Amino acid sequence: MKRQISVFIASPGDLSNEREYFRKAINQLNVGFGDGADLEFNALGWEDTLASTGRRNQSVINEDIDRCDVFILVMNRRWGQPAPDAQPFSSYTEEEFHRALERWKKEEKPEIFVFFKRVDPESEADAGPQLKKVMEFRKQLEETRQVLYHYFDDEKSFVSEVDRHLRAFAKDELPKSDKQRDMNVLPLSALNEVEKAKNLAITKMKEAEDARDAKREALLKVEAMQLQMAEDAAQLSLEGRIEYARQKFAQLVVETMNLRVLLLGYEFYKRTGDLDSAFLVLKKLLDISGPDEHSQGTAMVYGNLGVLYKTRGELERAEDMYQKSLAINEALGHKAGMASQYGNLGVLYKIRGELDRAEEMYRKSLAINVALNRKKGMANQYGNLGVLYRRRGDFDLAEEMFQKSLVIFEALGLNDGMASNYGNLGNVYKARGELEHAEKMYQKALVINEALERKEGMAKQYGNLGTLYMTRGEFDRAEEMYQKSLAINVSQGFKEGMANQYGNLGNLYKARGEFQRAEAMYQKALPIFEYLKSPLKNSVIELLSDIQSRAAG
């Protein structure tokens, strides 16, 4: 008899689409994963009460909560239907959550997951009563750390989160909810610029006060206040109080016209995976600097827009942004900006498999950085060339490039660059069959990335370790690493990383003889590789064909 897992979904009335997709996700899990693991997920919610009793009876709903194995709460902008008969709770949704939580405190079940659909900064800056309650609730969850919660952008990413969490629950592979809270360390250069601007505003404000220029003094007072607020938000982010920082940045990016504050807000949203909000901030910056202006500010915004489009996998739009930024930098004779965009274009061409074009861009960037003695830029391009040579199979030249890059990053004391090179050297050693040496490099890289909370770096090293364990035939350890990598890539919206890990999981299941699960992973990887115009799509097509022919045979 199959193991039965009851999953209850609670949500306010503004998430009807998600409730429908939740049931589809449950059905998909049962067909693939459930059959293979000899278990069955059962979806529960108020719709079931309505079907069985003809009315939405809260007491019957509560009975479902009292017997479920997993409780999922989904929220967006609304707090829920008022519940005058459910004091001290202000909505039935809140009552349902706390009923599940109290049961968990006594029985350590049900497992509770909370998912928040992202809300734009403009709405959060001017939140009404319903959204304010949701925002306060997010802060409470972050403070107590009793319950895992995650964000999602749309129905597709919601289904992915449900799928991932329920698989982990069924396999008893969930992380502990009382783990150290995440930090978000914002760029030191951006913070220094904000602090300088604040001190300058305070100085000018005193000068205006001495000159009895009340209007100028008032404007400078507002500017200094916003800059201080940005510093406070960055500090909250560093302390792991991401929800408090998020609400401060939401207010700031709507109210301010200060470029430094907006850039700090952009970095915050990008690093927390909120790409929609990051785009909104960049578009505001572009309006301020002028989309048709030939200025360093406009060039910088186009370059950052390219980075976001690349993260989303929109490579043609990313290339367009990089080219716009490059053209402005060339017209201005701004060599450092040209070097950055040559490097960005090189990374984009590498993703497409256009290795000759990528090498040309990397070489152009490197030449400028050498001429300007820009050490970090030189290190980045040595690293990029190393990745390219490794892909071509020239491991000795790749190792030479990575070592050159590592020496510079070590001299500069830049741990993030050191971590990237450790990981890249691990790839070279793995390709040579030096697995113990490779594992040491991956672990060194992982330790640094975890300390810095560099999500992309963590995802890469989990993936690298997974492939190494696969090579050794340690399939369970490999699957654990791939799933960790996939979870980060999904949460951050890293398309290339998602496709790579779906493909890796497909290879793992194929090696185990679990062909149905392998096919499901390849089917997820293929459209992403096609979207990215990656040459890896051809390999996935061949693997799918092989799996399907086996099934037919």
Image (cartoon, rainbow, N blue to C red):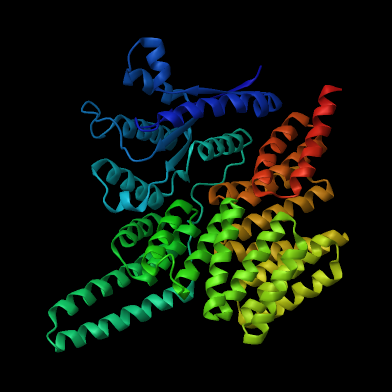
How many discs appear?
0
Instruction: Where is residue 41? Give x, y as percent.
Output: 57, 24
Instruction: Where is residue 66? Give x, y as percent.
Output: 42, 25
| Residue at 37% over, 23% down | 62
Instruction: Where is residue 65? Give x, y as percent.
Output: 42, 26
Instruction: Where is residue 2? Give x, y as percent.
Output: 65, 19
Q: Is residue 192 left or right of 467 when viewed as pictured? A: left
> Quadrant where the N terminus lies?
top right
Whether residue 321 is visible, yes or no, is yes
43 in relation to 342, above or below = above
> Which quadrant of the view contains residue 445?
bottom right
> Which quadrant of the view contains residue 206?
bottom left
164 in relation to 492, above or below = above
| Residue at 42% over, 35% down | 73
> Which quadrant of the view contains residue 439?
bottom right
Whether residue 241 is visible, yes or no, is no
308 in relation to 448, above or below = above
| Residue at 80% over, 71% down | 399
Q: Is residue 267 left or right of 444 when viewed as pictured? A: left
Q: Nearer the viewer, residue 227 or 91?
A: 227
> Quadrant where the C terminus lies?
top right
Q: Nearer the viewer, residue 230 or 479?
A: 230
